[in-house]
Image: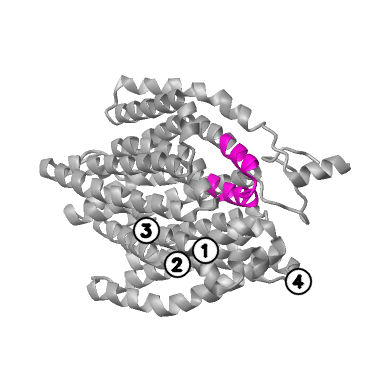
Amino acid sequence: MHLHRFAEPMTDTNRRPSFGRDSVWLASADVVAVLLAFIGQLILARALISESYGLFVIAVDLFATLFLLLDLGLPTLLARDGPRNPSAIWPGMLRIYRLQGIVVILFAPIVVSLVLSQSVHDGLMLLGAGVALVHIASYAPRAALRAAGDARFESITKVIERLMTTVGYASLYFIDSSDVVAYAAVFLGGAIVGLILALIGAYWTCAKTSGDAKPSQLGSDWVSKKSLLFAALPFAITLGVLPYVIRIEKFILANELGLDEVALFHVAQLAWLAGLLVPQAMRSALLPVLGETRNQPAMFNQHLGRVESICFALVPIGLVSGAAIVWILLPIGFPSEYFDGTLGASARDIFMLLLAGWAFTVLSVPSYTALQAGERPWMFTLLIMTVVLTSTIWGVVLIGLGAQTSIGRAIEMAAYASVASSFVMLMLGIVLSRRFLHFKERSLKWLATICAVTVTCVALSQQSYWSLVGIGLFILLPQGLEATKTIVATPSSMTLAEEA
């Protein structure tokens, strides 16, 4: 049996989570989904006036933020604990749905009523609520697929969902529709298709092998509803505030300036958010692997060390490719008003600043996921709460100061606030995951990388030759490539190898 943990061969009847294979599937699907989403955003930006586009963004983001608490943190537990006993994944998923259903019935009507009482566009807000609820419902079956080692089907559901949405946008655009409600309805339809496919995949992969298994076989946290909810509480609290990390600046801009400025910042964020799918895919693939070895510190730390090297190698690749793609393609796809200063700033320059936050987020993957999979999940909650708090403070202070100077300066300050919150997440995550000693051992590498990233991205936003400093980051590439070849022998694989 191949001992390479990142690329071990799997059969359809005995698939297990694998960081390399699963992250490739998830990241590849995210790349395709992002390209489709980018096309969709181009269509929206051209079909809708900037005010309607900004309202669409707020409606979707608002309910995505308010309803994420309904997730209860349970799919994260399923992804973490499922690999220990794959036959219990399906019963565990059904238990999640029963608990989430109760909370939705109690909580969702209250939230929707409160929002509608302040809304100027009830139809759009209701559709935004529907999109958020359907997306939350899709988390459990997708987590089940990932825990069962079938991230490939999870990836397929994401691509098809986004394809259906983009095709729907294009159809409306070609019939000259500028109705924001119609576009929101298409978004909801795509989400429903994705949910149905995820449920079919989870049933096909997990239900047929469940037999008489019970959720309690996933671990002590699953013995009762009370113990399950308590174990998931740190993740539930975290999920309730996590969306603010990437949305708080838009909410502050909307309050300080207006929807046009939100639309510009959102355009700048699009490519940045697309890039964030890479660390997100890595975290999603790494969590089941770490969950399976959480009681084996040596292998747990070996996985983290190897992933850290890979993250360092991704930084120069992401900076160069992100800057090149945005510099060339973003102005081609979006109206000139987002780049010529009509709305106060250039979305391209704002993105270059946000790129530093992307690099810090990539580097935080090992510590972030270690807190999720470790024995102290409340530390993960503390991390995210602190990041949201600092993001809010930085956003209010910096955007407020910028608004006193000019609209463009306020939008620029929003980008700096976002980067600052990403840096806090990186450094605090290292401390809370007890990897600070490891950080000190590589302090020169860390500090040089952080400084080079900061100088490069600020220089890119100012179109300065200092951006060439980023070329030096490619020295990190060989070590990352070597890390992908590292062999980690798990106890089970070692036993099989010895028997062979």
Label 2: which residue?
188
Label 4: which residue?
211
What is the CA distance from the residue labelled 4 to the residue labelled 1?
A: 26 Å
Q: Amino acid at mark 2?
A: Leu
Which of the marked residues, 1 or 2, is nearer the chain's N terminus?
Answer: 2
What is the CA distance from the residue labelled 1 to the residue labelled 3?
A: 18 Å
Label 3: which residue?
241
Question: Can you tell which of label 1 and label 2 is closer to the viewer?
Answer: 1
Residue 289 disc label: none
Mark 2 lies on a secondary structure that is helix
What is the CA distance from the residue labelled 1 to the residue labelled 2?
A: 32 Å
Q: How are the residues colored?
A: one colour
Mark 4 lies on a secondary structure that is loop
In this orientation, which residue lies closer to the viewer: 326 or 500? 500
Q: Amino acid at mark 4?
A: Gly
The picture places residue 458, in percent across and down from the top left corner, at 30, 30
| Residue 201, visible in the rendered structure | no
Q: Residues within 10 Å of mark 3 (few under 14, many from 20)?
A: some
Label 1: which residue?
231
Q: Amino acid at mark 1?
A: Ala
Residue 301 included in the magenta stretch of the image = yes
Residue at coordinates 38% horizontally, 56% vertically from top-left?
243
In this orientation, which residue lies closer to the viewer: 467 or 479? 479
Which of the marked residues, 1 or 3, is nearer the chain's N terminus?
Answer: 1
Magenta stretch bounds: 281-305
453 relative to 499, above or below: above
